[in-house]
Image (tube, helix red, strand yellow):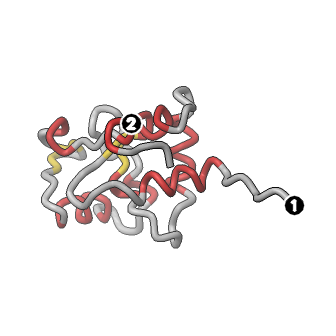
Amino acid sequence: MLPETPSFFERVYVVVRQIPYGKVTSYGAIANYLGAKQSSRLVGYAMNNSHGKDVPAHRVVNRKGLLTGKHHFEGTNLMQQLLESEGIVVVENQIQEFDKVFWNPSEELRNL
């Protein structure tokens, strides 16, 4: 019997679990790393489905550093609070100095 191939969502979770404390990445960067460049929205769906799966979904934002997924977290500012607890500065739902805290899985990871 062949081993089961991990689902796209599971592959996303493997990548997101690798994002270091105090760093963020984007939906598109994850999709690109997984070889599915046009699937950033699907990565977003995976993040929305990740609650209770030990996945630091708060570290995944849009390509401009906006907290577009914040409404999927409990409370109005939980995503921002989690990021700020890691030293990331957020002003009006926008990560400040985004290029300094951005983590690119295509550069940081070998194929998992």
4 left or right of 1? left
SS type, badge 1: loop
Report the Cα–Cα distance between label 2 and label 1. Answer: 32 Å
Q: Mark 2 points at which residue?
A: 106
* Among the 4 quarters of the image, the one containing residue 57: bottom left
38 left or right of 59? right
Residue type beneath disc 1: Met
Q: Which residue is drawn at 50% across and 36% down?
A: 31
Q: Where is residue 93 in the image (x, y as percent from the top left)?
A: 24, 46
Seen in the picture, residue 6 relative to 66 is either above or below; the reply is below
Q: Residue at x 28, y 61 (%)?
A: 77
* Among the 4 quarters of the image, the one containing residue 97: top left
Residue type beneath disc 2: Ser
SS type, badge 2: helix
Q: Mark 1 points at which residue?
A: 1
Which class describes the residues within 10 Å of circle 2: few (<14), some (14-19), or many (20+)? Answer: some
Judging depth in this view, the residue of 67 and 8 nearest the camera is 8
Q: Which one is closest to the eye, mark 2 or mark 1?
A: 1
* Among the 4 quarters of the image, the one containing residue 28: top left
**Marks 2 and 1 close (CB-CB < 8 Å):** no
Which image quadrant: the N terminus? bottom right
Q: Which residue is drawn at 34% across and 33% down?
A: 63
